[in-house]
């Protein structure tokens, strides 16, 4: 029985989803029909150096088209070296490579500085379209681009990969501080190329300027993460108004707000409603977090992750009351207070959360938190399936065993437990006695 083209495509897509390139390569050699389905799947997701290997595979093992020349300091060459062609690439190779590269939908540049010569292929990005005689960028139908830039001069190489079809862009910078001009150059290029981004991630020591100078070009953005590792205080001229940013992104679903890189709305200002945000991850000082949460209302928010890097909330219970009233759809809640906070959350601080249908809670708690408080928390959240509590003291194994046995819907409970108590032969026996005693009552 001969399989249809649709079935071959389904098989190839399944293997591509599992990153099984060895089987896909074998499938491409079975027949012309299977090859038509396997080749696009084989080239769908590409990682570093696969292009180099493929082009050089068209010549004998002891020869190469693409050759990397190590830097020669005596000639004043750059520390990164340079690429060159040992032979002109034949027409049949260029046609074949042009076909392969048109299949690429995802390109991930591996960020492994420990690997030998891991970074050399970035210098090839602007050269290959010329050497292969391409009429467009290297990957004309690319959708997902993820790259690691170790130096700002490599920005030009990154820009050579941009094409209108890209909707998912991730850029991780090295340990060097990234200047505002570099960020502006990248954002301007995204706008000029015509990328309709749905997901954008910048990661590194980023000095922010007004992030989205052309808001209309990013109006379709769904996911935004700006992870900045600059921990010193930034001047106001280098910070972005969080109100202006979110107002310019009406379709945003996921937002990561990191460190003090934004100007927060002043306390007492008018509350701003953002109708589409579903996931919020905020990492900043306690005062900035409070200003942010008191300044916005997110009616569709289902997941909130709060990480405090400095300071403490003076009115935590009141803040929780505000969060629950403005975002009643929250299902996952995480609050990791500053480890130096003298007053981490108590059960009373968490009581406003009882009005939410929470399924997951992750929280650093006070040393005054007892096993009875844990049980009250579990009872008061009937939809709870995952509970993680970071406490300075350990609970008794018997007490935690009782909570688990009485609330089987709780699939994952992570709390500190005294290891000696847990290993004690009588611990579970004692817990069983306590549980039976509760049943009798």
Image (cartoon, rainbow, N blue to C red):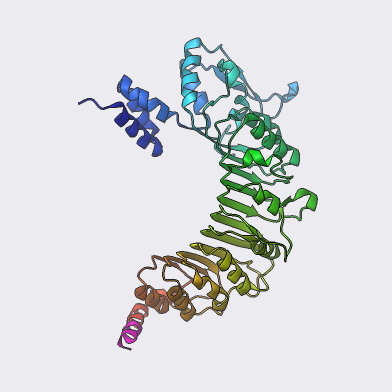
Does residue 429 appear left or right of residue 100 in this picture? left
Quadrant where the image shows the C terminus: bottom left
- Which secondary structure class fits the magenta region best? helix
Name the residue nearer the viewer: 138 or 349.
349
Q: Please state the horizontal and vertical placement of residue 249, each as a whole percent of the image.
A: 62, 47
Name the residue nearer the viewer: 61 or 97.
97
Q: Please state the horizontal and vertical placement of residue 60, each as a whole percent of the image.
A: 46, 15
Please tell me whether residue 254 is drawn above or below residue 435 in the rendered image: above
Look at the image and give the residue range highlighted in magenta: 433-441
| Quarter of the image where one finds residue 74 | top right
Q: Please state the horizontal and vertical placement of residue 114, each as a whole percent of the image.
A: 58, 40
Residue 233 in view here: yes
Residue drawn where x is 41% and y is 29% of the image: 42
Residue drawn where x is 54% and y is 77% of the image: 347
Residue drawn where x is 68% and y is 25% of the image: 71
Residue 190 highlighted magenta (yes or no): no
Please tell me whether residue 271 is drawn above or below residue 350 in the rendered image: above
Residue 391 in view here: no
Quadrant where the image shows the N terminus: top left
Residue drawn where x is 68% and y is 56% of the image: 259
């Amino acid at each position: 029985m001969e399989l249809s083209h649709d079935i071959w495509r389904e098989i190839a897509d399944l293997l591509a989803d599992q990153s099984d390139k060895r089987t896909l390569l074998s499938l491409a050699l079975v027949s012309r029909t299977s090859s038509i389905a396997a080749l696009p799947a084989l080239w769908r997701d590409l990682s570093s150096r696969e292009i180099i290997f493929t082009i050089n595979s068209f010549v004998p093992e002891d020869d190469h088209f693409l050759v990397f020349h190590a830097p020669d300091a005596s000639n004043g060459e750059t520390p990164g070296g340079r690429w060159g062609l040992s032979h002109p690439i034949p027409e049949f190779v260029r046609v074949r490579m042009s076909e392969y590269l048109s299949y690429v939908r995802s390109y991930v540049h591996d960020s492994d500085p420990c690997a030998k010569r891991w970074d050399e292929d970035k210098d090839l990005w602007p050269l290959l379209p010329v050497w292969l005689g391409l009429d467009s960028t290297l990957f004309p139908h690319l959708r997902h681009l993820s790259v690691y830039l170790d130096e700002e001069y490599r920005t030009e190489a990154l820009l050579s990969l941009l094409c209108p079809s890209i909707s998912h862009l991730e850029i991780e910078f090295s340990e060097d501080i990234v200047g505002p001009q570099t960020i502006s150059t990248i954002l301007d290029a995204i706008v000029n190329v015509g990328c309709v981004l749905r997901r954008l991630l910048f990661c590194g020591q980023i000095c922010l300027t007004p992030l989205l100078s052309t808001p209309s070009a990013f109006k379709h953005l769904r996911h935004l993460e700006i992870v900045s590792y600059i921990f010193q205080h930034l001047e106001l001229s280098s910070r972005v108004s969080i109100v202006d940013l979110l107002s310019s992104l009406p379709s945003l679903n996921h937002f990561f707000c990191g460190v003090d890189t934004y100007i927060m709305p002043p306390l007492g200002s008018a509350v701003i409603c953002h109708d589409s945000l579903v996931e919020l991850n905020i990492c900043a000082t306690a005062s900035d977090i409070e200003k942010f949460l008191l300044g916005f209302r997110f009616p569709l928010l289902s997941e909130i992750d709060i990480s405090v890097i400095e300071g403490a909330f003076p009115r935590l219970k009141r803040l929780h009351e505000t969060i629950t009233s403005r975002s009643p759809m929250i299902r996952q809640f995480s609050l990791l207070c500053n480890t130096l906070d003298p007053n981490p959350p108590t059960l009373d601080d968490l009581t406003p959360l009882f009005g939410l249908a929470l399924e997951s809670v992750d929280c650093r708690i006070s040393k005054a938190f007892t096993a009875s408080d844990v049980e009250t928390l579990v009872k008061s959240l009937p939809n709870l399936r995952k509970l993680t509590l970071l406490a300075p003291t350990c609970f008794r194994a018997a007490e935690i065993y009782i909570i688990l046995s009485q609330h089987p819907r709780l699939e994952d409970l992570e709390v500190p437990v005294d290891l000696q108590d847990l290993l004690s032969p009588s611990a579970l026996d004692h817990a069983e006695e306590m549980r039976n005693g509760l049943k009798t009552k």
